[in-house]
Image (tube, rainbow, N blue to C red):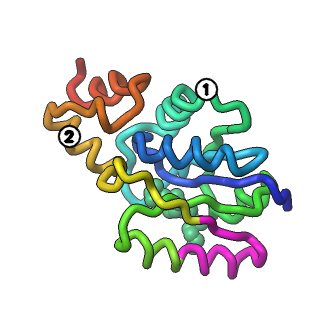
Amino acid sequence: MGKNIAIYPGSFDPCTNGHLDVISRSSKLFDKLYVAVLVNRNKVPTFTIEERVELLKRVTSDIPNIEIISFNSLLVNIATEVGASVIIKGLRAVSDFEYEFQMALANSRLVPGIETLFLPTSNENLFLSSSLVKEVASNGGDISSLVPPEIREDIVRKFLGE
Ligand code: PNS
C-alpha cells in the first residue's frame, strides 16, 4: 500500500466547486491523488460516467499529480488496486458525519489499515452539493458561483438543451 497515494471517491454528478476545493487541497497533501467516480448507484445518474469523468478531467487539468478513474465495485477494492492507503472525504455539516463515520469504519473493517481522512469543506461551499446544482440549473437559475466556469455551459445545456 503506497503511503503517499490517496483516493477521493464520489458520484460527481456533476462536479461542483466544493469537490474541486477538496481535490485541489488534498492533491497538495499526497504524491498522487486518484479521483474515483462511481459508475452505478441505485438511482440513475444525470450525467453518464463518461461525462462525469470528462468534466472532472477538464476542471483538474492544471493539477499534475491527479488521475481520474471510474469504478464499479467496493471503494476498498479500487483503493487497493491503485495502491491508495488513504480515502479522502469532504465533510460539510454534522449531518454528513454519521454516514461518513459508518463508511469509514466499514471500509477499515474490509481492508484493515486503510485510513479515511475527513477534510472540512471551505466556508463558502458549506451548503453546496451536486443535487443543489441540479435543482438550480433545472429551474433556470444561475449556477456560475457553484461550479467551475469550464463546465458551467455543459451543465446548463444538460438541463435546458441550450
Ligand atoms: O458522492 P457520493 O454519492 O456521496 O459518493 C458516495 C461513494 C461513491 C463514496 C460511496 O457510495 C461508495 O464508496 N460506494 C462504493 C461502494 C462501497 O464501497 N460502499 C462502502 C462500503 S460498504
Q: Residue at x 20, y 40 (%)?
A: 136
User: Is label 2 in a helix, a strand or a loop?
Assistant: helix
Left or right of 84 on screen, residue 43: left
The answer to whether the beta carbon of the residue marked 2 is less than 8 Å from any atom of ligand 1 is no
Question: Is 3 located above or below residue 56 in the figure?
Answer: below
Q: Residue at x 49, y 72 (%)?
A: 100
Instruction: Decide which of 145, 2 is in the foreground and name it.
Output: 145
User: Is label 1 in a helix, a strand or a loop?
Assistant: loop
Left or right of 51 on screen, residue 113: right
State the image coordinates of residue 126 (x, y, percent, origin top left).
34, 55
Left or right of 105 on screen, residue 115: right
| Residue 113, numbered circle | none
Is 158 within the magenta?
no
N-term mark: 1 or 2: 1
The crowd level at tag 2 (other Cα within 10 Å; few <14, some 14-19, many 20+) is some
Question: Is 128 located above or below residue 73 in the figure?
Answer: above
Q: Quadrant of residue 74?
A: bottom right
State the image coordinates of residue 11 (x, y, percent, origin top left).
47, 50
Mark 2 belongs to which amino acid? Val
Left or right of 111 on screen, residue 46: left
The crowd level at tag 1 (other Cα within 10 Å; few <14, some 14-19, many 20+) is few
Residue receiving disc 1:
61
Q: Quadrant of residue 70?
A: top right
Residue stretch rendered in magenta on the structure: 103-117
Is 114 within the magenta?
yes
Residue receiving disc 2:
136
Q: Residue at x 55, y 74 (%)?
A: 103
